[in-house]
Amino acid sequence: MSVSRVAEEGLADPSLPRDNGALVFDAPWQGRALAMAVLTVERTGRQWDDFRRHLIACIDDDPERAYWESWVVALDRFVHEVGAAS
Amino acid sequence: MSDDHHHPSARTPIEDRVDALEALLVERGIIDPAAIDAIVEHYEHAVGPMNGARVVARAWVDPAFRARLLADGTAAIAELGFGGPEGDHMVVVENTAAVHNLVVCTLCSCYPWPVLGLPPNWYKSPPYRARAVREPRVLLAEMGCAVPDDVEIRVWDSSAEVRYLVLPERPEGTDGLDEDALAALVTRDSMIGVARL
Amino acid sequence: VMMQGHLSGRFRHAIERMDPSWYLASSYYEHWLTAAATGLVEAGIITQADLDARLGAPFPVARPMRAPRLADPGPSVDAHRFAVGDEVRVREWHPFGHTRAPRYVQGKRGTVVRLDGIFSLPDVEYHCDHKRTEPTYSVRFEADELWGSPGDPVHVDLWDSYLEPVTE
């Protein structure tokens, strides 16, 4: 299937955990969190960088925290930023 | 994947949080659950280096296919069902006892997506792009790939429309393996040329 | 290299013109260095060749500023001028706009090893409403020729108009 340009950008994010090029998810919620970030960016007309800024900030806030947990915190902040939770 | 929506047993806090975010986004009409499932499905089956590994394994077991692959990479790769954007003009370069091939894109990060998936970060980095053409032998040694002195390193700079795939030499002691087992031996790095199998 | 106030505008513009994926992965200092180098090259204080010689490799700088639009794409070429085995030299020029001729092969001599398809010339396509198509080649360059010292050969894929015949 073909996916949107935003989905390809999300898929290509350099911070995502990989094994020999393929994405690695330890649990289904991680793949869903990735998909939700992609779809929120796409459906609100934002750029992937708008989400990524939050991801980088969350990782910086707590570098010891697991990557995907930081992702979810970032997603939470991003969702609120785009006004979805207002 | 979508089963998780309907089997809420023993959810961890993080799963609860992901569920809550999804519910919020759905409620606001921003996304729908089917769209999430579709993207996850795509990611799980997204192109990866196993495509290229299957091409290599086929070439190892089938000399006629190997010949076709070296003569017209795009057509032979298409026989296995692979192709598409960034793979419309494939050239396959074979490693031999006398030659080791290395692929780079000095101008940006051109890469044969349909057979190798996404380019690794180091492939896109300015140091790799500069050093692969300037000092490939030293670079490869640093990356853990020792190329014997009597083997020529041929660097291929993907500066136009052609995309390259390296056909590594078949490792010794693999005569008894079938195609699937052989494909499992092939790494992405060996098909870029920064590793030998 | 000290960046003075009057260069800060170009400095920021040079950072903006860095390839985005590169920018996001770079450290602060790599940004600074790229912008500084780009600014100096564009101000004519040093040349790209100076940077490349210092590094011993092509020195990455930010993408060039937008070049003027071309009204005329020039004639398309539908037949390869060169054959496998021909000796060719890459033209040496410093385009203000986009080109797919890597700097490290400009002016260098090599051998055609493969004839490839006919494609739109990016130098034109990026700056013109019309395309110009030309044949492409893979050209082999020896390390001696590229860097002045022994080493391994590099093959570069080049468009027809980048190449001139070598006259003995």
Image: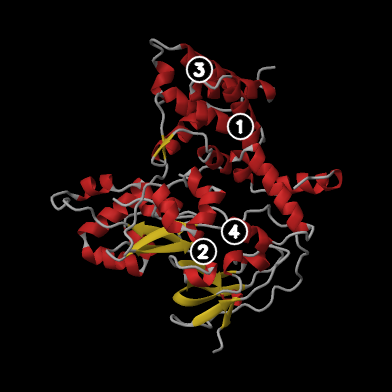
The image's mark for residue A52 is: 1
Where, by quadrant of the figure, is residue B74 drawn?
A: bottom left
Q: Which residue is mark 4?
A: C58
Can you give x and y, in whole percent of width and height, for residue B138 in the image? 43, 54
Can you give x and y, in whole percent of width and height, for residue C133 in the image? 59, 73
Q: Is residue A74 above or below residue C88?
A: above
Q: Left of B50 or right of it: where is C21?
A: right
Task: Report in which chain the residue with disc 2 lies.
Answer: B
| Disc 1 from disc 4: Cα separation | 30 Å
Q: Residues within 10 Å of mark 3 (few under 14, many from 20)?
A: some
Q: Secondary structure at mark 1?
A: helix
Q: Which residue is mark 2?
A: B161
Q: Amino acid at mark 3?
A: Asp
The image's mark for residue B154 is: none
Task: Report in which chain the residue with disc 1 lies.
Answer: A
Where, by quadrant of the figure, is residue B156 drawn?
A: bottom left
Residue sitting at x 71%, y 45%: C15
Can you give x and y, in whole percent of width and height, for residue C156 in the image? 50, 67
Residue sitting at x 44%, y 12%: B12
The residue at the far bottom in this view is C168
- Tags 1 and 2 both on a single chain: no
The image's mark for residue B19 is: 3
Q: Earlier in the sequence, mark 3 or mark 2?
A: 3
